[in-house]
Image (spheres, helix red, strand yellow):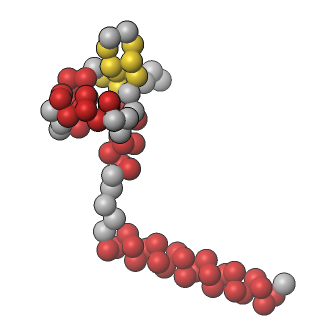
Amino acid sequence: MARRTMDAVEAANYLHYSVRTLYNKCSRREIPHYKVGCSILFYEDELEEFIEAGKVCTNADFARLADMKLLELDMKSRLRRVG
């Protein structure tokens, strides 16, 4: 399956940024992009990852992470007692 590419205007619209903000983020290397000649191109899947990386965790997310960590610590403790 071919990856979908976007030019700067499409990427800015996709991310709800102005084109100027997008160019500024590119110049600061904050967003993944590719230079082809004088053009800047973006892969849609990389923009999705960029969006996901900025996710703010909810209280429920933190509770799940805490529960997983407690289970992990409990299993390690039990394994030490057995081994």
Q: Looking at the rendering, which quadrant does residue 80 occupy?
A: bottom right
35 displayed left or right of 16: right
Looking at this view, name the residue that lies furthest to the left: 18
Q: Residue furthest top?
A: 37
Residue drawn 33% across the image and 52% down it: 54
Q: Quadrant of residue 83?
A: bottom right
Name the residue: 20% across, 23% down: 9
67 to 48, vertically: above or below:
below
> Measured along the vertical axis of the image, is residue 7 above or below residue 21?
above
Identify which residue is drawn at 70% across, 86% down: 77
- At x 54% / y 76%, what residue is drawn? 69
Residue that sits furthest to the front in the current view = 28
Q: Relative to 62, does residue 18 appear above or below in the rendering?
A: above
**Residue that sits furthest to the bottom in the current view:** 81
The answer to whether residue 78 is left or right of residue 69 is: right
71 horizontally vs 31: left or right: right
Q: Residue 8: image x %, image y %?
A: 25, 23
Residue 64 percent coordinates (x, y) = 43, 74
